[in-house]
Image: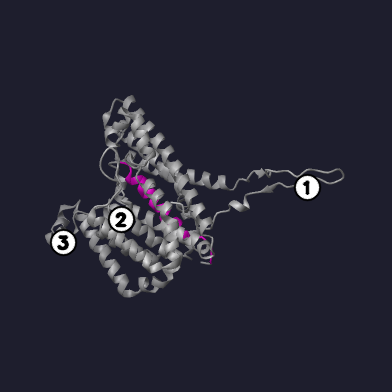
Amino acid sequence: MGQGERDLRLDFLRGVGQWMIFVDHIPYNFLNWFTLRNYGFCDAAEFFVFISGYSIGFAYGPAVRAGEMVAATKRLWTRAAQLYVAHIFLFLFFTAQISRAARRFDNPMYKDEFNVAQFLENPDVMIQQALLLKYKPVNLDVLPLYIVLVVAAPLILWGLLRRPHLTLVCSGLLYFVSRHFGWNLPSFPDGHWYFNPFAWQFLFVFGIWCGFGNGPQIRPWVKSLPNQLLSWTIVLVALVIALSWNFEALYGLVPESIGKILYPIDKTSLAPVRLIHFLALLAIVIKLLPPDLPALRSEHLRPIILCGQRSLPVFCFGVILAFTAHWILVQVSSSIAMQILVSVGGIGLMTGVAWVATWYRTLPTLVTVPPTVPVEHPGEERADHTHNTAAAETEPSTTERA
């Protein structure tokens, strides 16, 4: 893969993660058995956060090294503002969708299950808290985490530019200290953020650290035989333990002493076993999925790649579709066939949104007129001062999109 060339592995993994998140967001869905969360300690969330960090390090590293820190900060904070606006619009649409379903079908399960009951009782207060990112209905926790991390990204890049390894160590210390003292951001009306940013930042910073140029330093060790054997051992042990949660025959294979060490496996503050399991999976993926794999450019994987490249609109649309699918399973039929139909159909619609978003980006940009027009003098020909801003707005080959 050449310098500046887009790493399709990131898009592929992000696309797979989008599909898994959508399927997992549909309660009591048979296809949940085809997602990562049932076969280990971590799930698609870890890959999402790491890849987001890696993309930022890869895309903005050259600019930061070239002294364009201010420009990089402006771009990242603009992106954070876009994510914030997307989250608020998604919140309004999502709560309206659930509220209408709860009232139209007189089923309180919808508002209770998706944490919108208090929104219906006090919409003015809850909207205010939503604007502050304190109130979040179910399935709307990821974007606030990403917003906070992107806002902090310039500081992380600044630290990596000067002391890359020390910055990573400080991030790790914050991870352990926040877990020890229970640091988290408050939610409304009570509780804390589902994704603790003080803990999840470590995975994000590690991603930026790798994308910033430090990845090649550890790649030989990651691909080494001892590390691969260790990674496969961790993944297989996690597989047996995870399967024992659903299959009683395997429960006896897990010693009680192991259970005392592992449990509870906290997702909110990124339990160490989740982090270790993710790192083991990441090492295996790096070994088995080279950047020049021809399959990544095949038409068969194109739908997944597109969903990974246009992850923001795909994710937002997927949240809406997940509740729609849940409504169909409750109101129409919950048969296995219907579960497969709404899941596969939803993935198809998400792919359609990704295709439309990709097509939309190819449309020509409007030619703009400068704010000041020079005075024309008799006998002088009028100069054409219009210009196309498309080139100035061209994004890096690998962006920070989630």
Query: Are the two marked residues, 2 and 3, in contact with CB atoms closer than 8 angstroms?
Result: no
Sooner in the amino-acid sequence: mark 2 or mark 1 = 2
In the rendered image, which quarter is residue 50 located in? bottom left
Q: Amino acid at mark 1?
A: Ala
**Disc 2 vs disc 3: which is toward the camera?**
2
Using a 10 Å C-alpha cutoff, classify the residue at mark 2 as few (fewer than 14 neighbours), some (14 to 19) or many (20 or more). many
Residue name at image x 37 percent, y 67 percent: 166
Instruction: Calculate the distance from the C-alpha at mark 1 to the C-alpha at mark 3.
Output: 77 Å
Using a 10 Å C-alpha cutoff, classify the residue at mark 3 as few (fewer than 14 neighbours), some (14 to 19) or many (20 or more). few
Q: Is residue 283 left or right of residue 380?
A: left
Magenta-highlighted residues:
3-26
**Image location of residue 199, percent across then percent down:** 30, 55
For disc 3, the marked residue is 258
Q: Amino acid at mark 2?
A: Ala
**Image location of residue 265, percent across then percent down:** 22, 54
Report whether residue 9 is seen: no
Residue name at image x 25 percent, y 63 percent: 236
Q: Is residue 273 magenta?
A: no
**Disc 1 vs disc 3: which is toward the camera?**
1
Residue name at image x 41 percent, y 72 percent: 217
Report whether residue 240 is seen: yes
Q: Nearer the viewer, residue 181 or 366?
A: 181
For disc 1, the marked residue is 383
Instruction: Calculate the distance from the C-alpha at mark 2 to the C-alpha at mark 1.
Output: 57 Å
Q: Amino acid at mark 3?
A: Ile
**Image location of residue 353, percent across then percent down:** 48, 43
- Number of callouts: 3
Which secondary structure class fits the magenta region best? helix
Query: Are the two marked residues, 1 and 3, in contact with CB atoms closer than 8 angstroms?
Result: no
